[in-house]
Amino acid sequence: MSHIIPPGSTLGILGSGQLGRMFTRAARRMGYRVHVFSPEHDSPTGQVADAEVVAAYDDLDAVRAFARGVSVVTFEFENVPAPTAAACAECAPVRPAGSILHLTQNRLREKTFLANAGLPVAPFHPAHSLADLTEGLQRLGLPAVLKTAAFGYDGKGQLLITNYNEAEAAIKSLNHSDGLLETFIDFDREASVVAARGLDGSFAHYGVIENLHRHHILDVSLAPALIPPRLAAEAVDMARCVLEKLDVVGVLCVEFFLTRDGQCLINELAPRPHNSGHLTIEACVTSQFEQQVRAVCGLPLGSTEYLRAAAMANLLGDLWSDGEPDWAAACALPDVKLHLYGKREPRPGRKMGHLTALGATVEDAQQKVLTARAG
Ligand code: AMP
């Protein structure tokens, strides 16, 4: 099977944060070498990679030189500019394809794709001007959420509109960037499905993971999610549909709202391993990062079986407000694992690391991980 990229080859990754770091760890364990393209020195990925190429994403000569030195290019940073992915593709396969990155970099493109594919999303309306927004508010009603179409994540660039008088100020807050208005969903829970698709079209998924957010940032993930099996099967089917329609080779996460009346709506897509899937490192036979390695190298996908129930709690920079947290206390429970990403500056809201706890039940794992984080 000549299309396989065998262990011993060099893999390239665009983006150098914690996702790249955990991808690199999985790849190196399997005997691959990893080169990372990073906008900064001593990055979380660069610290564990074989080589860290430091250059800007728009330095296309540097991008091509990087891609020529690897057997395949993947990414962990979603906002890699389209010309950068295209320059890579001149020199090496890019998996998932740059076209998928392009689609998911813009909420309006992404939502339009999902709606055209017949997948359920919150009702939405383009809102590039006050006239669009007024029309959107009339069509969707209140409350509604105005989001920037591009480069939004973790709730950045979002505004809740509860009164028609707020429209003018809301559109100003977009600062001339394109916007998207969405019906506010009074959801029961948030969840995600992390899934992988191989070069041969094979599909694997980690079931539904429940996600608890704080200030729009993921705080805790629980797996398997305690939801009715019918809902879980629906969410997995939708994820399968997305990966197939986009012809994904790699890992992609679908984020969902589970509504109070038992519906599953897709909120957004991330064409890479996802924060909610970090618990697969300890909980599953094959982690989401190993799965990304396998998929982009054309290897068979691994088993996604859960060995134990699991809970993950993020460690944000806020935890450092009184100095370095007490890691001995965090490690005191034997079923809790500490991950730190090698970031020097603990800014509020910055993802510095995470804890994963395994348990006999999800509730047990959740209690352990929260106890460990409380120190
Ligand atoms: P996003 O940046 O789209 O992932 O949104 C971040 C978080 O904002 C989500 O995880 C939700 O908690 C919340 N959110 C986003 N869109 C909506 C919506 N239409 N209705 C209610 N909450 C939302």
Image (cartoon, rainbow, N blue to C red):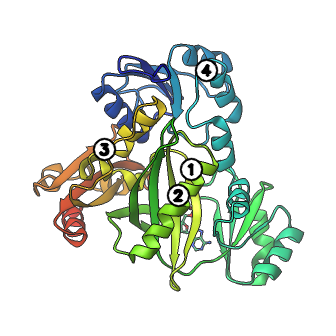
**Which residue position is annotated with label 3?**
286
Residue type at the position of mark 1: Leu
Tell me residue 364's x, y (percent): 19, 69
Of the two numbered discs 1 and 3 on the same chain, state the one appearing first in sequence: 1
Q: Residues within 10 Å of mark 4 (few under 14, many from 20)?
A: many
Residue type at the position of mark 4: Val
CA gap between label 3 and label 4 equals 31 Å
Is the C terminus in the top left, top right, bottom left or bottom right quadrant? bottom left
Q: Residues within 10 Å of mark 2 (few under 14, many from 20)?
A: many
**Which residue position is annotated with label 4?**
63
CA gap between label 1 and label 3 equals 19 Å
Of the two numbered discs 3 and 4 on the same chain, state the one appearing first in sequence: 4
Q: Residues within 10 Å of mark 3 (few under 14, many from 20)?
A: many
Comparing marks 3 and 4, which lies closer to the viewer? 3
CA gap between label 1 and label 4 equals 27 Å
Q: Give the residue at x 68% y 65%.
A: 118
**Which residue position is annotated with label 2?**
239
Q: As drawn, which residue projects farthest toward the front?
A: 1
- Residue 173 occupies quadrant: bottom right
Of the two numbered discs 4 and 2 on the same chain, state the one appearing first in sequence: 4
Callout 1 secondary element? helix
Callout 4 secondary element? helix
Of the two numbered discs 1 and 4 on the same chain, state the one appearing first in sequence: 4
**Which residue position is annotated with label 1?**
243
Q: Residues within 10 Å of mark 1 (few under 14, many from 20)?
A: many
CA gap between label 3 and label 2 equals 19 Å
Residue type at the position of mark 2: Ala
CA gap between label 4 and label 2 equals 31 Å
> What's the mark number on residue 124?
none
